[in-house]
Every structure is written in structure tokens, then in C-alpha cells.
């Protein structure tokens, strides 16, 4: 398979060869075709081709995809510029360094007046005035996609020239440091009428901590994708755009209220959000077409309301919480959140979710809504006896699941008691007795379970008891994969004994294939 670098070299060789052989058929191709061919080359190489002929100068001056992230600033000194009388001259002498912003300015100044810019992409350290000037220049050329990443000496104001652009369809603005401020919502709401995708990173919002009325149908009637990352000071966010299909929200640590209503929203990702030190936090999600949700490393809110998620296919959930600080309100909120995902076909629970459910199990009157459509259940947990109630709760609530994946971690440094051979011969283990007491309540789960994968399996009592229970009662179980923890070579004989015990027990209880890894 041809690599990208090899493809670039081949394209350049073919173009130069067409001139050296005296028959230039490539230059006769239409502009759109040549633009498509050059799209695969770095912008420096495209600029150098402009010295070949007047035809190639015209191609360079109308090239619609300007990706300046592919060049190093010193290399810009070697990129030729064509003067108005057609003579070649250097963009800058080698003795004087030129900044990337200067090079972008010069490229924009050489463009033909009616030549539009499809994509402008750059990463620079520059002042706000230079940034504003570059964006104004791009807007004058009817830029459709603007992808900017900047670092400035001080925070800056959102470039207003982009707001009023009628041509802009995709806008990405990322500030490395220290960030930027949004203009008043009244100004933002008067622009972006044709925007399809908006991505903003490192926004300073301490003086205006609410985006309650900005992301609405009236302000963004065509918005399909929204990405907000690092909104410092954001406390209240309401999103209700009727054509929005994807929403990504990350690193909004002061967020207290999140309200999402999306009749066409299909993908939702929320990571590292919500205030850990404020009471009354709340999340509300009403999205009938939502297919995939990622809820990772978020602080548990005091209230959760997930409604009408009837199209859900995949859900990944993980919370950030100190277990000793969990009260009844937050435990109920977790239960409400997970119950709102009951239509999901695939569920991954990480970041202490099983531990939280085990605490939840002690609250009277709280139970999960059945996951009646769930086919695949994946659990990440520091597995030990205190987590067994949470596992049992999930198994009882998953009546049609056919694949169970358990990834056991030791991230909480919990001491796990080692295996002893009696566990496979006698039914006197406390954990084993607990599992047996749950067999009737888990009957539907056990009647559908076909594949079990346990990563990090060891000879401790919790692992052995669960494996023994599933082998005994999993009547349709077809395969069980046991991926053992890494151990020293001197334990190999011990591991072989464990395998022998497991194989012997499985033959006496079910016909499942046992695979050790």
C-alpha cells in the first residue's frame, strides 16, 4: 500500500517530468482536477510549483485548501512569490526570519479577488490584532472552513468578523493559553446563520457564566456539530438546536446545570465536567434519536433526568467520585442516570460504577430499570467481595444479555485473597453462598448468557466464586475466556493446577469452551 509520503513524492515527480519531457499534459487539466491533485501535497510544495509557468501561478493563486500546519516557519523563507510583472523573487531573504502569520498574510494578498477559500488552517503564536487581521482576510475570500489554534500573550476577545460571515460553514477556534472571551450573546445570536460545525476551546466565562439562550434554533438553525472544551466559569449550559447531530462537552469543571434537548441528536460525549463542591447540580437529557453516549469521569450530579432515549445503541459511563462522600441523593441520581440508559444494546461501566451500585444496593426501594435490549455488558472494576452486590444488581437488570466482559483492575490497591483448592470442591464460601442465593433472580440473565470474558482473572476468592457460579448455572454458555493476571514464572505450576480445577468443574456442569490467555 502506497504511503502518504511516497504518494507526495510520486505526484511531484510526475508533474516535473511532464515539463522535462516537453509535453505538458497535466497543465491542460481543469482547475478543479489540479486542485484535487495538489490537495495531497504540503502547501510549501504547491507554492514552489508556481514557478513552473503562468498556468501554475494561476493554480496556486486560486488553490482553495490552505493548510499552513504542514510547514515550519523557517521553511517559509524558501517558498517563492510571484510579483505582478511575473518575475520570481524570494518570499524573504534567508538572513531574515519571517513569521508564519506574515507568510499567511502574503499568501492571502496574492490571491485573485474572486477566488474563494474552502479551508484555511493554521497554528500560530501571535497577537490578537494579527489574528483578527488573518480572519478578516479569510472572510473577504468567503472562507468555508476555518481551523485556528493560537497562543497569545494575554486573553483575547472572540473575533467578530467570523460571526458575520455568510460563507463560513465550519469554525474551530482553540486557544492554547490563556484563552478568549465570548462577546455578549446578543451579538453571537445575530451571526452564524449558515454554520454547520462549531468547535471552541479554552473559553473564559467568569463574567458571563451562562449559555442558557445561545445554542438555540434561532441562533444556530443549521448547526449539526458542537464541541465545547475548557469553558472556565461556565455554570449553566442549555442546548436546544433542532438539527444538531453531535455534541461534545469536555473539561467544564464549574458546570452546575446541563440541559440538552435534541430531536436529531445522535452522538453525545460529556467528559470531566460538573462542580464537585456545589449542591443542587443537575443534568437533563431528552434526545429520542440518541444512539451513542459517552459519560466519562464526570462528577455525580444531585439530580439526573434522562428521558426518551429510545434509540440508544451504545453507552459508556464512568463517574468521578470519592466513595466515602456518597450520600443518598447522589446514589439515587446514579440510579436515575443508569435507568435512563435502559434502552441501550451495549453498555460499558467504568470508573467506580460497580462500586457505586454496590453502595446503592443498601438503599431500600432503589433498583435499576431493566435493560431489556442489552446484549453486551462490559464492567471495569477493582473486583472484591464488597462489589458483588453491584454486580448482582446489574446481572438481575440485564435479562437478555448474551456477552459479559469483566475487566478487573487493582487501581484501588485492595487486597484480594488467594485461591485455595477447596473453593472448587466445597460450597462453603460466603461469596459462593451469596451467588447461589441470587440464581433464581438472575434466571433470565443466566438463560441468555453465551460468552464470558474476564480480564485480570486471578485465583482470589471473588474471581473463583463468580466463575464457578456462571459455569454451574449458565446453561447456554458457549465460551469463557479467562485472561490471567501477569505473574512470575515460578507460579506457572500453580496456574496449571487452577486450570485443571476449572476444566474439571466445567465438564461436570456445562459444555462451555474454556480458553485461558
Image (cartoon, helix red, strand yellow):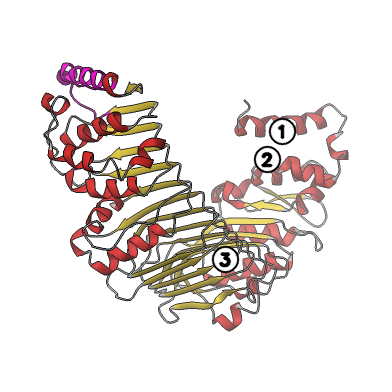
Question: What crowding class fits label 1: few (fewer than 14 Cα within 10 Å), some (14-19), or many (20 or more)?
Answer: some
Q: Secondary structure at mark 1?
A: helix
**Image quadrant in which the N terminus is located:** top right
User: Which picture quadrant has residue 408?
Assistant: top left
User: Which picture quadrant has residue 298?
Assistant: bottom left
> Which of the two residues, 259 or 170, is positioned nearer the viewer here?
259
Magenta span of residues? 484-506
Numbered badge on residue 40: 2
Alpha-carbon span between mark 3 and mark 1: 45 Å
Query: Which comes before the other along the chain, label 1 or label 2?
Result: 1
User: Which picture quadrant has residue 282?
Assistant: bottom left
504 in the magenta segment: yes
Left or right, residue 493 beside residue 137 = left
Residue 295 x, y percent position in the rendering? 41, 56
> Which of the two residues, 410 or 42, is positioned nearer the viewer here?
410
Numbered badge on residue 414: none
- What residue sits right under mark 3 in the picture? 262
- What residue sits right under mark 1 in the picture? 11
168 vs 118: above or below: below
Query: Which comes before the other along the chain, label 3 or label 1?
Result: 1
Residue 105 makes an appearance in the image: yes
Residue ID at (20%, 26%)? 487
Q: Secondary structure at mark 3?
A: loop
Dominant SS type (magenta) = helix
Amino acid at each position: 500500500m502506497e504511503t502518504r509520503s511516497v504518494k507526495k513524492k510520486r505526484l511531484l515527480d510526475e508533474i516535473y517530468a511532464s515539463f522535462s519531457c516537453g509535453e505538458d499534459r497535466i497543465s491542460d487539466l481543469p482547475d478543479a482536477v489540479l486542485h484535487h491533485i495538489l490537495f495531497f501535497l504540503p502547501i510549501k510544495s504547491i507554492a514552489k510549483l508556481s514557478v513552473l509557468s503562468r498556468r501554475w501561478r494561476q493554480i496556486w493563486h486560486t488553490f482553495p485548501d490552505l493548510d499552513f500546519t504542514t510547514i515550519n516557519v523557517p521553511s517559509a523563507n524558501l517558498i517563492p512569490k510571484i510579483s505582478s510583472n511575473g518575475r520570481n523573487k524570494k518570499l524573504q531573504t534567508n538572513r531574515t526570519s519571517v513569521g508564519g502569520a506574515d507568510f499567511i498574510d502574503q499568501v492571502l494578498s496574492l490571491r485573485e479577488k474572486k477566488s474563494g477559500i474552502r479551508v484555511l488552517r493554521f497554528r500560530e503564536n501571535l497577537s490578537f490584532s494579527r489574528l483578527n487581521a488573518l480572519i478578516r482576510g479569510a472572510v473577504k475570500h468567503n472562507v468555508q472552513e476555518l481551523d485556528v489554534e493560537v497562543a497569545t500573550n494575554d486573553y483575547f476577545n472572540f473575533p467578530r468578523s467570523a460571526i458575520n460571515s455568510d460563507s463560513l460553514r465550519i469554525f474551530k477556534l482553540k486557544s492554547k493559553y490563556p484563552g478568549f472571551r465570548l462577546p455578549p450573546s446578543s451579538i453571537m445570536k445575530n451571526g452564524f446563520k449558515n454554520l454547520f460545525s462549531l468547535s471552541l476551546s479554552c473559553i473564559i466565562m467568569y463574567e458571563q457564566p451562562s449559555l442558557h439562550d445561545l445554542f438555540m434554533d434561532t441562533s444556530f438553525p443549521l448547526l449539526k456539530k458542537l464541541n465545547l472544551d475548557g469553558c472556565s466559569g461556565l455554570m449553566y449550559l442549555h442546548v436546544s438546536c433542532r438539527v444538531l447531530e453531535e455534541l461534545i462537552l469536555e473539561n467544564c469543571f464549574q458546570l452546575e446545570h446541563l440541559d440538552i434537548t435534541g430531536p436529531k441528536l445522535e452522538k453525545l460525549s460529556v467528559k470531566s465536567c460538573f462542580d464537585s463542591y456545589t449542591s443542587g447540580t443537575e443534568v437533563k437529557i431528552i434526545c429520542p434519536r440518541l444512539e451513542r453516549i459517552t459519560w466519562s469521569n464526570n462528577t455525580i450530579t444531585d439530580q439526573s433526568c434522562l428521558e426518551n432515549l429510545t434509540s440508544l445503541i451504545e453507552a459508556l459511563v464512568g463517574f468521578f467520585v470519592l466513595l466515602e462522600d456518597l450520600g443518598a441523593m447522589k446514589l439515587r441520581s446514579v440510579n436515575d442516570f443508569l435507568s435512563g440508559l435502559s434502552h441501550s444494546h451495549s453498555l460499558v461501566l467504568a470508573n467506580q460504577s460497580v462500586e457505586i451500585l454496590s453502595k446503592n444496593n443498601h438503599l431500600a426501594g432503589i433498583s435499576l430499570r431493566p435493560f431489556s435490549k442489552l446484549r453486551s455488558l462490559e464492567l471495569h472494576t477493582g473486583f472484591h467481595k464488597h462489589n458483588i452486590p453491584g454486580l448482582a444488581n446489574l446481572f438481575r437488570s440485564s435479562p437478555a444479555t448474551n456477552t459479559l466482559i469483566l475487566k478487573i483492575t487493582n487501581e484501588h490497591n485492595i487486597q484480594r485473597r488467594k485461591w485455595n483448592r477447596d473453593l472448587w470442591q466445597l460450597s462453603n464460601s460466603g461469596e459462593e453462598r451469596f451467588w447461589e442465593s441470587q440464581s433464581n433472580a438472575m434466571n433470565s440473565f443466566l438463560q441468555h448468557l453465551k460468552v464470558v470474558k474476564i480480564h485480570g482473572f486471578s485465583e482470589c476468592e471473588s474471581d473463583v466464586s463468580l466463575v464457578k457460579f456462571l459455569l454451574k448455572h449458565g446453561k447456554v454458555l458457549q465460551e469463557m475466556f479467562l485472561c490471567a493476571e501477569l505473574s512470575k514464572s515460578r507460579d506457572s505450576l500453580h496456574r496449571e493446577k487452577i486450570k485443571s480445577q476449572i476444566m474439571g468443574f466445567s465438564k461436570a456442569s456445562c459444555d462451555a469452551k474454556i480458553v485461558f490467555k
